[in-house]
Amino acid sequence: MKRYLWLTLSLLSILVLLLAGCGGAEEPAEPDAPAEPYKVAFVYIGPPGDLGWTYEHDRGRKIVEEELGAQVETAYIENVPEGPDAARVIRDYAQQGYDMIFATSFGYMDPMLEVAQEFPDVKFEHCSGYKTADNMSTYFGRIYQARYLSGIVAGSMTEANNIGYVAAFPIPEVIRGINAFTLGVRSVNPDAEVHVVWTSTWFDPVIEREAAVALLDGGADIIAQHQDTTEPQKAAQERGMLSIGYDSDMRAFVGDTVLTSPIWNWGSYYLDTIKAGVDGSWSTHQYWGGLKEGVVALAEFSPKVPADVVKLVEDAKSDILAGNDVFCGPINDQDGNEKVAAGQCMSDGDMLGMDWFVEGVVGTISD
Amino acid sequence: MIISLLTSVLSITLRAGTSLVYATVGEIYTERSGILNLGLEGMMLMGAVTAFATAYYSGSVGLGLVVALAVGAMLAAIHAFLTVTMRANQVVSGLSITLFGSGLASFLGQRLGPVSNNYYLVGMVGPKFTPIRIPWLSKIPVLGALFSQDILTYLVYLLVPLAWFYLYKTREGLNLRAVGENPQTADAMGINVTRTRYLYTVFGGMLAGLGGAHLSLAYTPGWTENLTGGRGWIVIALVIFAMWNPARAILGAILFGGINAVQFRIQAAGTTIPAEFLNMLPYLLTILVLIVMTWWEALSKRIGAPAALGNAYMREDK
């Protein structure tokens, strides 16, 4: 008996180290529209109160509600785990007669595709994936453009020439962000280095803080991040150092030590897409909007950012808007080998599969 | 350079380990009485959210601690009622308390906040414990880190030796161990088994609540959903790691806080060791220790898990 208890204990400990807890809360739609409203559902990976990724999607949903009023009816479910649970949630919405369903995490891709095939009359929208169908589209944003601009701020303001970057997982999306940020840093400060620490988690306040503190101990005076909480920003602030936020305007939650944040603005995309659904002009698309479309942006600057730095950022922004994208040559990799020749630009496909660091990054991508 | 690095590693090890030590010592006492409490994660989360909410509205971190202690005690009392009085399966009861506690904590985090923030507690800044530097002592190279901590970490320095002394050197401690080893005999000796089990289960819950409060009031001040990130489960493993000895609970803190602090610094300095490997080191070591303990029976007998751990007791049973 005792032996089994031991085994159970050990197994449980091992299992739960792998599993993050997941509580789900369901928000019913508000039934107040008189005519037959267009019903839209959102599936969230986290809670809208995460102040980051899901918070921004929910801000987009609220903009839709405000703009279209009684024409639409929106609903959302938060904390939906990726995998089979997602299929269940999406299928539920489709069965309840929702006209359009947005799924806001990469891991919802296959579950959504599966449900999309069962409900040909429902429109499906998947964020950050690459699989489409007649009734399923993808959408994402070129956040790397905003990260490049935030890199200019960091590169101009670092005194130690050492910038820390707390990053979740070595996947192309994150690597692209680190590279764009570093290119921004080096465009104004060729001596600065960006030190990367991987946490292997999107969301763990304690781990994110410890990673940031390690970077600060290593001499970093600005902390950037690709995580889901504001903890790295808070850790930098406690040490009297600066930071760059992500996802949402983290300055609002942490204070002026957050110089700026690359942020998402889903509102206009959601509005346009839902309008297209209402008037019947919706068709399958693969949307990857950037600064130009306004789906990504740089949050308002902290008063700590001097005017000449703001000017540098504005110039770089107009350059990108004019068509000179971030990943245009010459670009060297970490070891100094030329990856993109002068006058050439990376294709979207190459960017989506990025698995190497640019010159100036200190860190490793294991393969 | 090396001195400031060591100081920082020691400091973050202690701060990261504080909540783990509280919960581990509490769980050791609970398990010593023969009750396995798998509800720790739920209790820590509930302690964290209620402590922060209380401190946020009252402005008093002390009141936050009191509430966290009370909430931990209440959840543990439910567990004690189910497992001691109703003699329910301890694993099932503990797991349900974790599920209940984490769900309720998320819910409260979305309802207890101010109207201006849509009732969300997330993102609110409240009062917190700040490190208190002890004059002179905090100036010592490296070891000075021991003396520039927040008050909850200082309390750990007292808690661990006291918990050890109580368990091994006092009559009450002996009674507690007797109940966990052999409740029949303990009963025959005139020890009230039910009362003992209730008492130490509730005590363990209080310390788990306190551990949660340290996260939301001192280490990562504020509330975010799933703030503990599974630390309640790690504690279950650390109890085995500590071999049910409160003095060794501090080892768990060093294992967890320390290895993470060091591995992030190795990464920051630039290394060719894969980050994924470094990230899993603390977990890997815990699993290794668990495996060794589980199969090395000679050792596990000598260090002794409480023999009656997990078993309900009823006087009429043989």
Image (cartoon, coloured by chain):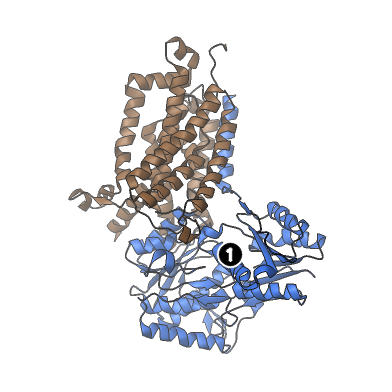
Chain colours: A blue, B brown
Residue B269 visible, this angle: no
A329 is higher (above) or lower (below) than B146: below
In the rendered image, the quadrant that contains the C terminus of chain B is: top right
A174 is higher (above) or lower (below) than B166: below
Residue drawn at point x = 74 percent, y = 72 percent: A277
Q: Nearer the viewer, residue B207 or A11?
A: B207
Q: Residues within 10 Å of mark 1 (few under 14, many from 20)?
A: many
B82 is higher (above) or lower (below) than A63: above
Q: Nearer the viewer, residue A111 or A74?
A: A74
B229 is higher (above) or lower (below) than A69: above
Picture quarter containing residue A306?
bottom left
Residue drawn at point x = 52 percent, y = 26 percent: B81
Q: What amino acid type is highlighted by mark number 1?
A: Asp
* Relative image position of residue B309 (x, y in whole percent): 51, 25
Q: Nearer the viewer, residue A112 or A191?
A: A112
* Relative image position of residue A358 (x, y in whole percent): 51, 75
SS at mark 1 in the image: helix
Residue B307 visible, this angle: yes
Residue drawn at point x = 48 percent, y = 85 percent: A316
- Left or right, A44 with respect to B255, comes to right
Q: Chain of mark 1?
A: A
Picture quarter containing residue A284?
bottom right
Residue identifier under label 1: A58
- Left or right, B284 with respect to B247, comes to right
In the rendered image, the quadrant that contains the N terminus of chain B is: bottom left
Q: Residue furthest front?
A: A34
* Relative image position of residue B85 (x, y in whole percent): 53, 22
* Relative image position of residue B177 (x, y in whole percent): 42, 21
- Left or right, A307 with respect to B96, comes to left
